[in-house]
Image (cartoon, rainbow, N blue to C red):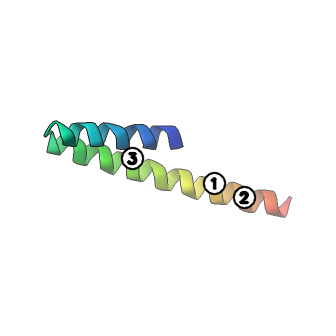
Amino acid sequence: MLRWSIAFFLIAIIAAVFGFGGIAAGAVAIGRVLFFVFLALFVLSLIVRLFR
């Protein structure tokens, strides 16, 4: 999931360089959501491992 968020951020950077503002904003939004989902699942897995 972290790879997908990095990929969307790279797509956003490339789209912004070429002037596609709408596509860049959409890619940033998707990348940000994926990153926070990854972060939440990572913290949850750390907590579960702590209690095992």
Image height check: is 17 above or below 49? above
For residue 31, the mark is: 3
| Residue with the mark numbered 2 | 46
Residue 34 visible to the viewer: yes
- Does residue 23 appear to the left or right of 44 in the view shown? left
Say if mark 2 contacts mark 1, CB within 8 Å.
Answer: yes
Q: Position of residue 1 (x, y in %)?
A: 53, 41
Q: Residue furthest front?
A: 17
Mark 3–mark 2 Cα distance, whole angstroms, equals 22 Å
Mark 2–mark 1 Cα distance, whole angstroms, equals 6 Å
Mark 2 residue crowding within 10 angstroms, few (<14) / some (14–19) / many (20+): few
Residue 1 visible to the viewer: no
Q: Residue furthest left?
A: 19
Dot 2 amino acid type: Leu
Mark 1 residue crowding within 10 angstroms, few (<14) / some (14–19) / many (20+): few
Dot 1 amino acid type: Phe
Query: What residue lies at 83% left-to-right and 63% top-to-bottom?
Result: 51
Q: Position of residue 23 (x, y in %)?
A: 21, 40
Circle 3 sits in a helix, a strand or a loop, which is it? helix
Q: In which image quadrant can residue 52 be found?
A: bottom right
> Which residue is nearer to you in this view: 30 or 13?
13
Mark 3–mark 1 Cα distance, whole angstroms, equals 16 Å
Q: Earlier in the sequence, mark 3 or mark 2?
A: 3
For residue 42, the mark is: 1
Query: What residue lies at 57% left-to-right and 58% top-to-bottom?
Result: 40
Q: Earlier in the sequence, mark 3 or mark 1?
A: 3
- Does residue 50 appear to the left or right of 22 in the view shown? right
Say if mark 3 contacts mark 2, CB within 8 Å.
Answer: no
Query: What residue lies at 44% left-to-right and 43% top-to-bottom?
Result: 5
Image height check: is 33 above or below 10? below
Dot 3 amino acid type: Gly
Q: Position of residue 32 (x, y in %)?
A: 39, 52
